[in-house]
Amino acid sequence: MATVAEGVRKPPRRSFGESALPYLLSLPALLVCIGILVPFVTAVWYSLQRYNLAMPYLKGFIWFENYKILFTDTVFWHTVWVSLLYTVLTVGIELVLGLTIAMLLQRSSAFNNAMSIALMLPLMIAPAIAALMWKLMTNPNFGIFSYLLSLVGVTDFRWGSSPSSALFTVVLVDVWVYTPFMMVLLLAGLRGLPRQPFEAAELDGVPWTFVFFRITLPMLFPYILTAGLFRMLDAIQQFDIIYAMTQGGPGDTLMVFQVQAYLEFFTYTNVGRSAAILMVLWAITYFLSHQFIKYWLRLRERARGVA
Amino acid sequence: MSYLVLDGVAKRFGKDEVLKDASLSIEKNEMVAIFGPSGVGKTVLLRLISGVAPPDAGDIRVGGESVLGTSPEVRETGVAFQNFALYPHMNAFENIASPLRARGADEAEVKRKVQETGELLKIAHVLHHLPRQLSNGQKQRTALGRALVRRPKIILLDDPLRNVDAKLRYEMRLELPRLLKRFESTVLYVTQDYKEAMALGERVAVLFDGRFQQVDHPAAVYRSPRHVEIARLFGDPTINLYPIRPTKGEGGHEVTVLGQTLRLKGRAGLDRPCLIGIRPEDVHVEQEPSEGSFPVELDAVTPLNVRTVLFLRTKEREEVFATCSESRGERFGRDHRQVHARVDFEKALLFDEATGERLAA
Amino acid sequence: MHPAIRVVLLTLIGLFFLFPIVWVFLMSFQTNETILRIPPSLVFEPTLQNYTALISGRLETGAGVLELAFMQNLWNSFVLSFCSVALSLLLGVPAAYAFARFKFFGSEDIAFTLLSFRFAPALLVLLPLNLYFQDIGLNDTYIGLIWVYQLITLPLILWIVRGYFEDISPDIENAYRVDGHSWFSTFMKISIPLALPGIAAAALLSFIFAWNNFVFALILASADKQPVTVGALAFVTASGIQYGQIAAAVVLSILPTLALALYAQRYLVEGLSLGAVKG
């Protein structure tokens, strides 16, 4: 039996199979996603080109010309404005409404739990189909909501087909679909909060406004932030509801990023401009998604620590 | 040739060098207790031996052949994990049967062996239960059964009695050696309870600072620890330790400890600051003064079943622990009072204060 | 808060969120005449004619017979969602395990990138793909759509399941290896069964998301591969004023996800709360 000659002997490397294992396991998923990266790179390329499907002979590389045109174009700034307005309105209303519902259902009882499940149903409906449902209900001829409004004397409210109420209508549908998401996450957060501060406050007879603003809100903040960022990411990219409801109309009332890009592509066949619009949107979502993922991972760590 | 050999094993986690140079040789069918405070890498060591993790350096040999680079499933080890690590979705029977099934044993054999193991461990009546339906003691026996059922050549037990209640721990401490003897296996038993180590190990291997500091028979580790830290870890209450400054006198070194001057004959290395260690049982406490005794104050009397711990203070306010039998302890009452102590200095241990190494007698 | 206010508030909220579903459900059992009646009434003679028209695929109108492909849409939705989730599970569960158990070169960055796919604008990928699909022969196949649907289902499965794998004590897997089982058998017999609630939650959620997807199929699917979301919209254009049938089509397209959600509500909450609760 040979003894160890050198002071420290390096043990043999683990077998090839063992060290390659993580790569083997994740490779198929990676390959599928890399396939999806190809069109992404193409889109970046398109955004730097003059490229109109109707005029293929004009196709050519023009550096940042598409972006320059965009940023000096009031149509584009209108798109930015509508998208931001839509995002702020939907996320804001959904947060307030979601938090209210979550607080109403905070105590775990059979009724509250059943209610929270029932309230989740709109979230299970495809946003495009939800828009269709609301279209039926706001139809000027037989829509139940149009009828209800006429009962209180409002007969000229035209919901999605009037520029003055189109935004209100799509925001309403968005709120109907996505508030349940806020509710689920905030309810989980509320029920996971430690009880002691609330019990102490109750013993001291502290007014509920103080409890809400100084205890509940700060403790719930990580959940609010995560849920809010998640919804902002979806809202700034909203397509389904607006496209199904009004196709961005009437006129250009609801031309948000993706609807605008869609129409540029399919109606005006301006691939270069469409790609440039989407790149701007991508930059926004890239920033937001990094924020979201950061806070989300922190939240998850916390949840695991408690569990 | 030793059966299981750890040769200069090292393992680090990031910056944390848990094992630096751990070497240990274990004979076939020997039962060795690995003892050390928590966090010294006892569990890591078992993981290296079972093949769950590879060492950074060094070699592990079984029967003369290196097992490095082989996966856990081909090493013939049975492991009882400290947290039991039972499969929560399988009942106790299937948990214990797992090593047999891995080797493709036929159904009849599985049934027979699991039943046999279950009876041996007194859990035959709960084999159909899921882990979460078992008591802690039953879980621990199931984990043990899984480690033992296929009679592996090497059994690694990671503090198996840590998570069970005191009564069961005591019973198992008596039962385990008897049980393990029947299996003719080489057993490594990890524990951070020195009494358990002494009760269960034919030899005790003391691990800290990334190395095995002493590997010896239990009584030897207790009587002649090689390091002051070992002396401190073995013993309850802990050994009384006092710094001493030996001065050279006629016919040897003289030291003053607990107000007593004594002469140390023929001890080498006394030309530096030392620590003297006196086991509590070597301090004899009496009501009346006697030859060689000195007066001390009795501060507290704590009965511990068969023994009583006495907490004393000398005139110089030095603290001394002593033990005596319970019946003797009762006579001291519980009051604060003046008593007399006599120390068996012959049995005292001397350590180098700087290195902690024991100075040979 | 006063209990009465609470009850009133909850009733209002319940009405707002559930009334549209109930109303469309009721509409689907009415003829066009009763639907158009003013004032609307809750009392009507229920009829199944809307459903029979959809199921038979033939709609008799005053102007003639209209061919409806709605059942084909329903079938497409099922095929697309089911296959997308199945493929995502096949690809995503092993990858989730790799990300949970091994810290390998670039693992965090890769996992992060995969997740950020979920949040990138869909059209950014879809519009170029629309130009490609014909060239690579995927424009008229389920396979092309199922592949692109991975953008929705894969990140979700990857990240939810990863969390569940991380919660399994590695010692349980180690114990099984030491017992003498191979890595693969440990993965199949220990890791997968213990992460099963998470896998179920992720599969359920991604099935619903795939089913509800609209824009992917709108841009890439040929007419005979369209799912219900796109089909229902096309149906509105085609059938014009057949409101009863539209309502029935809506009911048929939302029924599967609603039923699934009610059946597996526990998993749904786990999945939807982004890992903030564990059941």
Image (cartoon, rainbow, N blue to C red):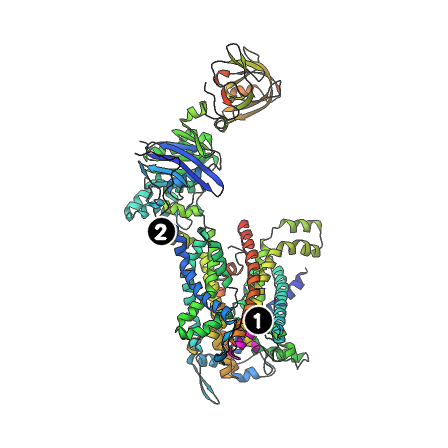
Q: Is residue B151 above or below residue C69?
A: above
Residue C272 percent coordinates (x, y):
52, 61
Find disc 2 in the rendering and name its residue.
A17
Residue B47 percent coordinates (x, y):
41, 41
Residue at 70%, 57% in the rendered image = A209
What chain letter is assigned to the residue under label 2?
A: A
Residue A9 visible (yes or no): yes
**Quarter in which the N terminus of chain A is drawn:** top left
Residue range of the region highlighted in magenta in the rendering: A245-267
Q: Amino acid at mark 1?
A: Tyr
Between circles 1 and 2, the one closer to the viewer is 1
Q: Which mark is residue A67?
A: 1
Taking depth in this image into account, of B267 and C142 the one nearest to the observer is B267
Residue C46 percent coordinates (x, y):
51, 79
Q: Is residue B72 above or below residue A35?
A: above
Taking depth in this image into account, of C60 and A289 the one nearest to the observer is A289
Q: Is residue A146 above or below residue A228?
A: below
Q: Secondary structure at mark 2?
A: helix
